[in-house]
Image (cartoon, rainbow, N blue to C red):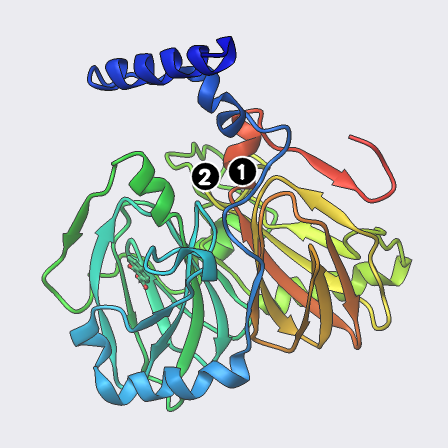
Amino acid sequence: MPNKVKRFQEREDFYSRISTQNMTPLWEVLDNLVLNQPEDSCVPAHWKYEELRPALMESGQLITAKEAERRVLVLENPAKRGKSRITNSLYAGYQLILPGEIAPAHRHSQSALRFVIEGNGAFTAVEGEKTLMQPGDFVVTPSWNWHDHGNQSDAPMVWVDGLDIPLVEFFNTSFKENLGEDAQMLSRPAGDALARYGSGLLPVDYESRSLNSPVFNYPYARTREALEIMRKTEEWDSCHGLKMRYVNPVDGGFAMPTMATFVQLLPKTFKSIPYRSTDATVFVVVEGSGSTLIGEENFHWNAHDVFVAPSWNWISHRAEEDAVLFSFSDRVIQEKLGLWREQRGNESI
Ligand code: 1HN
């Protein structure tokens, strides 16, 4: 028997023997464990609001928000069907609440963000304060905070939920509790948090007890106005247009401990140069239309669509008209762990 074949058989025999002891040789798997660069198992994907809205409205006739607890159509990454995730670490879905409905109070260790798509003045209550929501508002629901929703307006309300469900699953740290009531007791008037913490002011002896921003609704009216004033200087970033991050005013960090959130303005005819980063990112189109090339796939988007870019895929945006994109990712965690990297198309790493 040639020496090489003998060697191979000896190794295979050894692998089978140690397998019974729940062991495996690193040298056979090392290249799959430690990659030269990220290879995301998720794929780029796009959900067109115009095409999915009929199904979302149909769900409103099938089940009430109360019976469903939360009436949401989950956006599943096409490479991860059945796993309730849009990226490896994040969950996203479109939630519908019809006039007169409530979604009962509960709390869980998963953190949630809401980004409002359509409707006018339905509310969410978070840990004792209610906020009325308008399209484009970004609302924070921290881990273990009581929250319930209600719609006392006369129009359906739809928002995109982002949660860190796969992260919490990874750590096996899921806890949940139902309050047993439709709505929680309120302890502060609507608008209290924004006035107290989101006006360039903080109570003089304020000491944060939370990892989350005390501002739990970042109203779009303020965000949009800020972008509109800043655009006058025309300092467009070649990769991002005019991109801002939502900030915790207490420490200058991201608004939430597990999900980083951003908003960017891309002016009409703007074309960004390619950019990639290690945080797979979920984009929500707030206004306008355009297209985004992710890896080799081009997605033409309109207002209220969602699209997702996996880790380390090159992204470039093109705006057909003034466009605003909201986005979220796990960048905040990656940065804390020293893992986050980015690369611009015109530079080496
Ligand atoms: C949840 O609590 C909400 O409060 C939405 O609106 C989506 C998905 C999974 C688990 C909890 C909400 C959710 C969720």
In x, y percent, where is residue 337? Answer: 52, 25
In x, y percent, where is residue 83? Answer: 34, 55
Q: Residue sitting at 37 percent across and 91 percent down?
A: 154
Compare marks 1 and 2 and give the one earlier in the sequence: 2
| Any part of residue 99 in sight | no
Image quadrant for the C terminus? top right
Instruction: Decide: is 348 above or below 139.
Output: above
Instruction: Decide: is 286 above or below 10.
Output: below
Q: Nearer the viewer, residue 247 or 53?
A: 53
- Count of all numbered marks drawn on residues in the image: 2
Label 1 CB-ligand 1 distance < 8 A: no
Image quadrant for the N terminus? top left
Q: Quadrant of residue 322?
A: bottom right
Q: Nearer the viewer, residue 214 or 38?
A: 38
Q: Helix, strand or loop at disc 2? A: loop
Q: Nearer the viewer, residue 2 or 331?
A: 2
Label 2 neighbour load within 10 Å: few <14, some 14-19, many 20+:
many
In screen coordinates, is 339 left or right of 118?
A: right
Q: Are marks 1 and 2 in contact (CB under 8 Å)?
A: yes
In x, y percent, where is residue 345? Answer: 82, 44
Q: Which mark is residue 274?
A: none
Q: Which residue is mark 2?
A: 257
Q: Which residue is mark 1?
A: 332
In screen coordinates, is 257 left or right of 147?
A: right
Q: Amino acid at mark 2?
A: Pro
Q: Residue sitting at 74 percent across and 63 percent down?
A: 265
In screen coordinates, is 187 left or right of 243?
A: left
Label 2 CB-ligand 1 distance < 8 A: no
Quadrant field for ligand 1: bottom left
Q: Amino acid at mark 1?
A: Val
Q: Quadrant of residue 323?
A: bottom right
